Amino acid sequence: MTEQKVPLDRRFTAFLLQSQALKFGDFTLKSGRRSPYFINAGAFDTGRKIALLGSFYAEKINTAIADGTLPRDIDTVFGPAYKGIPLAVSTAIALTAQYDMGVGYTFDRKERKDHGDGGMFVGTQLRDGMKVLLVDDVMTAGTAVREVVPKLREAADVRIVGLVLSVDRMEKTRDSNISAVAAVQQEFGFPVVSIANVREIFDAASHMTSDDGLPLLDEDIKTRAKEYLDTYGA
């Protein structure tokens, strides 16, 4: 199967594993849940890795534009500090270089700067009427989105056209049986798409082997992942 014919979620899973961004074990999440798998965005720590990651985001965005989920005339890609900064920059570069989209990038500061250029935002400055696309790494509860949307709308009367994630963990919120992604879509009214979701990732990884030819996922990992998703999955 040629590279172009391999589904995006399978290519992305291979990239996560090669980058050592996808880990299996016993991890306590920000939500307090104990998970048998973890996506570590800090593993994208070289120019090559972050450039490839930006290309994956750009490919997913281009697909979402083609199917009408996202508009093509996006003004800027916004990434929340700190992990979202390289995501916004690399995605904007990839959209420009690979799909001829003249988009900007924007990210926020943790604290307002009162000297030099000042303000809360770096990069393309927000103006009324701008179409802003959010990018983030992994959504478990949607906390980061709820923190950043008010900041953007306070800065200018922008239109947030969507959010693109690397991975949707497909977990229900604490107080409902719907996923965090579905909750964010209902609350804010914009689409949320991901390069891959956790079920796609596990399906792809289950067809992969290690360097010594053994199955990449052992039965213990599969069992614990299934139990976790049976408990928290939406």
Image: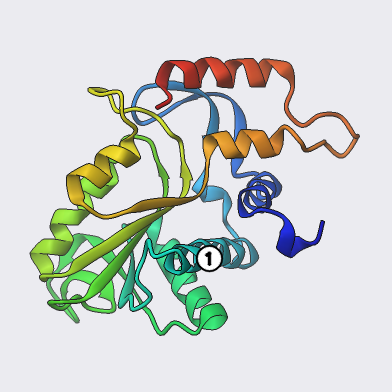
Q: Nearer the viewer, residue 56 or 111?
A: 56
Q: Nearer the viewer, residue 115 or 228?
A: 228
Q: Which quadrant of the view contains residue 159? A: bottom left
Residue 139: image location, x then y, percent: 38, 41
Residue 128: image location, x then y, percent: 12, 77
Q: Nearer the viewer, residue 154 or 61?
A: 61
Tell me the quadrant of the picture where the C terminus can be found.
top left
Q: Is residue 219 above or below residue 145?
A: above
Residue 146: image location, x then y, percent: 21, 46
Secondary structure of the residue carrying tag 1 is helix
- Circle 1 residues within 10 Å: few <14, some 14–19, many ≥20: many
Would residue 84 appear left or right of 149 to someone viewing this image?
right
List the single residue furthest toward the right: 212
What residue is drawn where x is 57% and y is 55%? Answer: 44
Q: Is residue 136 above or below residue 128?
A: above
Tell me the quadrant of the picture where the N terminus can be found.
bottom right
List the single residue furthest toward the front: 67
For badge 1, the amino acid type reads: Gly
Residue 48: image location, x then y, percent: 64, 66
Q: Is residue 207 visible?
A: yes
What residue is drawn where x is 41% and y is 52%? Answer: 193
What residue is drawn where x is 15% and y is 59%? Answer: 151
What residue is drawn where x is 53% and y is 65%? Answer: 54
Q: Which quadrant of the view contains residue 154? A: bottom left
- Please name the residue that numbered disc 1 is placed on: 54
Would residue 5 appear left or right of 135 to someone viewing this image?
right
Would residue 119 appear left or right of 223 to someone viewing this image?
left
Q: Is residue 82 visible?
A: no
